Amino acid sequence: MPNTSKLIRPLVHALHAYVPGEQPKVKGLIKLNTNENPYPPSPKVIKATKAAVDGRLRLYPNPTAQVLREKLATLHGCAPENIIIGNGSDEVLALATRTFVEPATTKRSSKSTIQYFWPSYSLYPVLADIHGGAKNVVPLKADFSLPSVAELKRGKKWDFNAALTFVTTPNAPSGRGYPTAELDALCAAMKGVVILDEAYVDFADESAVMLALKHPHVIVSRTFSKAYSLCFQRVGYFIAHAELVAALDKVRDSYNVNGLGQIAAAATLDDLPYYRKNFRRVIASRTKVTEELTALGFTVLPSQTNFVLARPPKFPAQEWLQKLRDQKIIVRWFSAPEVRDYLRITIGSETEMAEFLRVVKRLLKA
Ligand SMILES: *Cc1c(COP(=O)(O)O)cnc(C)c1O
């Protein structure tokens, strides 16, 4: 009888898996923990998706999500050859590690290096570890802003030749946005592939999508999950130089994007005014929640996303997490030292945020 534990690669034994925010099924729960959009998909998207549930579930979907890529190319002013779709943007981020990064050997090399600022999206270290890449983690500045190229050079830790660099912009979990000019300067100084992860960009003042069309080594990553209320369907994509897209395409599973996801995402692009209205609602709530929490003694970082990172008064952040949970409100708390004093609060609907603020006031008085 083989020892099952010995069947598993040591790399996998040592792996710290990604921890997704929980999805409890509790009635009346206010869920402000995973940055989902509080508003439903457009009625046209629901209709198109339902209309596709018939005998064609028997067939394989279009392997390259051709219709969706053509629509995205029109939207971004590029060619379909500049777009690759994934089963959520998480899948394309993983594909990038397999396409651009050599697994690490004992000798440290830029060719095996996956680099990112910290704090940022906690999936990056997991992707690096799964692939067997070497991690180079460089801190953001104390206020979560980006170090300049000159500061990175002076700091000596940043690897300008790293095979793959992830930049979350706007940043998660801080919510801070980065000016395109700063990102452009950073990209111009890099020799390896740079992925600008724009998961939250629809809630921001500016997008850096033009950098993917300007620099051949720069990729912009987008998702239908957060801004387009489509987490359930798992659709994300890269915009990049055609040669990088062709390379990623060779590594991709043939049918990586399910048919209903392709249809829902394509229908989404046919009703953008509906979503733009929702972005404005979320941004208006974000402004209001920021003002009210600040008045209550919270330190709230300026946000360009659909969440805020806030340092609470009176109790430690982890205690707030529990107190809110007892009142059926779940927010996110991260144990990393840079952010352990903060709560990350997703912007929910107007009603949800009013209830959240009511509970916060009650807890402050107790
Ligand atoms: C949510 C998120 C993603 C991935 O979303 P998908 O649902 O896989 O498309 C990517 N990057 C960041 C920073 C995110 O917060």
Image (cartoon, rainbow, N blue to C red):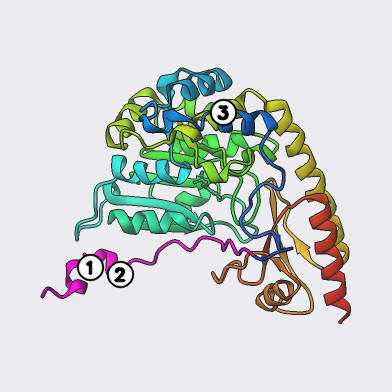
> Residue 355 sits in which quadrant?
bottom right
Queried whether the magenta region covers residue 155, the answer comes back as no
* Label placed on residue 51: 3
What is the magenta range? 1-25
Establish if 359 lies above or below 351: below
Establish if 177 lies above or below 274: below
Residue at 38 percent across and 67 percent down: it is 16
- From where the camera sits, is residue 253 visible? yes
> Residue 298 sits in which quadrant?
bottom right
Mark 1 → mark 2, Cα distance in angstroms: 6 Å
Tell me which numbered mark, 3 or 1, is placed earlier along the sequence. Answer: 1
Discs 1, 2 touching: Cβ within 8 Å: yes
Q: Is residue 285 left or right of residue 319?
A: right
Amino acid type, callout 3 = Ala
- From where the camera sits, is residue 156 visible? no
10 Å neighbourhood of mark 2: few (<14), some, or many (≥20)?
A: few
Discs 3, 1 touching: Cβ within 8 Å: no
Q: Nearer the viewer, mark 3 or mark 2?
A: 3
* Label placed on residue 14: 2
> Residue 296 sits in which quadrant?
bottom right
* Residue at disc 2, secondary structure: loop
Residue situated in front as seen by the camera: 28 or 53 = 53
Establish if 106 lies above or below 48: below
Instruction: Point out the residue furthest to the left here.
Output: 1
In the image, the residue with mark 1 has its CB under 8 Å from the nearest atom of ligand 1: no
Which residue matches tag 1?
10
Residue at 70 percent across and 33 percent down: it is 275
Instruction: Point out the residue furthest to the front here.
Output: 55
* Label placed on residue 84: none
Tell me which numbered mark, 3 or 2, is placed earlier along the sequence. Answer: 2
